[in-house]
């Protein structure tokens, strides 16, 4: 079943990716850029996913727009995640972040209380395809 992305907000400035790359000295994966352009600040119609034996929730995709006050922002996430190998792109209802790991090109779950990172073991494409 295809996922519907509700309440999407267009990315106001595509230079946002270059800004993050320069600031964090990383290279933004093309598949993640494309995904953000299609689902910026959106809420998925299917949102559950598994991390090991634990069911988790993708509440929304982070907004990659500056000065966005009505949605969760990538800038807030980047300010609290010290690991530059992680690019936050989603948030759950409890303040934890769903990130793209540059180490192995998989999606990981970052716990905001412990900073523990748990891998889904899935690429971005597979992660999105297996949301239920």
Image: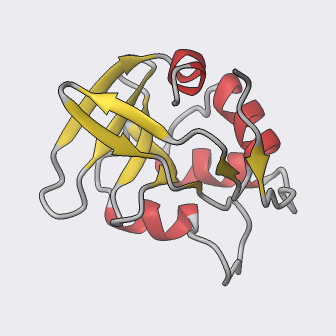
Tell me: 99 left or right of 81: right
Tell me: 123 left or right of 15: left
Query: In the rendered view, how is the structure colored?
Result: secondary structure
- Percent x, y for residue 78? 44, 60
Q: Is residue 126 above or below residue 9?
A: above
Tell me which residue sits at (79%, 61%) in the image: 7
Q: Nearer the viewer, residue 58 or 73?
A: 58
- Percent x, y for residue 93? 41, 64
- Percent x, y for residue 125? 60, 18
Asked where in the image residue 34 lies, by quadrant, the reply is top right
Tell me which residue sits at (45%, 19%) in the image: 105
Q: Is residue 36 above or below residue 104?
A: below
Tell me which residue sits at (63%, 73%) in the image: 71
Asked where in the image residue 82 lies, by quadrant, the reply is bottom left
Quadrant of the rendering where the N terminus is positioned: top right
Q: Total of numbered circles in the picture?
A: 0
Q: Is residue 58 above or below residue 2?
A: below
- Percent x, y for residue 16? 73, 55
Tell me: 66 left or right of 117: right
Tell me which residue sits at (59%, 20%) in the image: 129
Q: Residue furthest left?
A: 114
């Amino acid at each position: 079943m295809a996922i519907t992305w509700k309440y999407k907000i267009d990315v106001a400035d595509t230079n946002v990716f270059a800004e993050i790359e320069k600031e964090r000295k990383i290279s933004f994966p093309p598949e993640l850029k494309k995904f953000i352009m299609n689902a910026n600040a959106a809420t998925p119609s299917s949102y559950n996913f598994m991390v090991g034996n634990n069911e988790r929730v993708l509440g929304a995709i982070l907004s990659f727009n500056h000065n966005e006050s009505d949605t969760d922002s990538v800038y807030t996430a980047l300010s609290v995640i010290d690991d530059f190998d992680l690019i936050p792109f989603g948030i759950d209802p409890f303040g934890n972040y769903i990130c793209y790991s540059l180490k192995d090109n998989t999606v990981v779950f970052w716990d905001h209380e412990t900073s523990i990172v748990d891998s889904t073991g899935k690429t971005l494409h597979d992660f999105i395809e297996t949301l239920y």
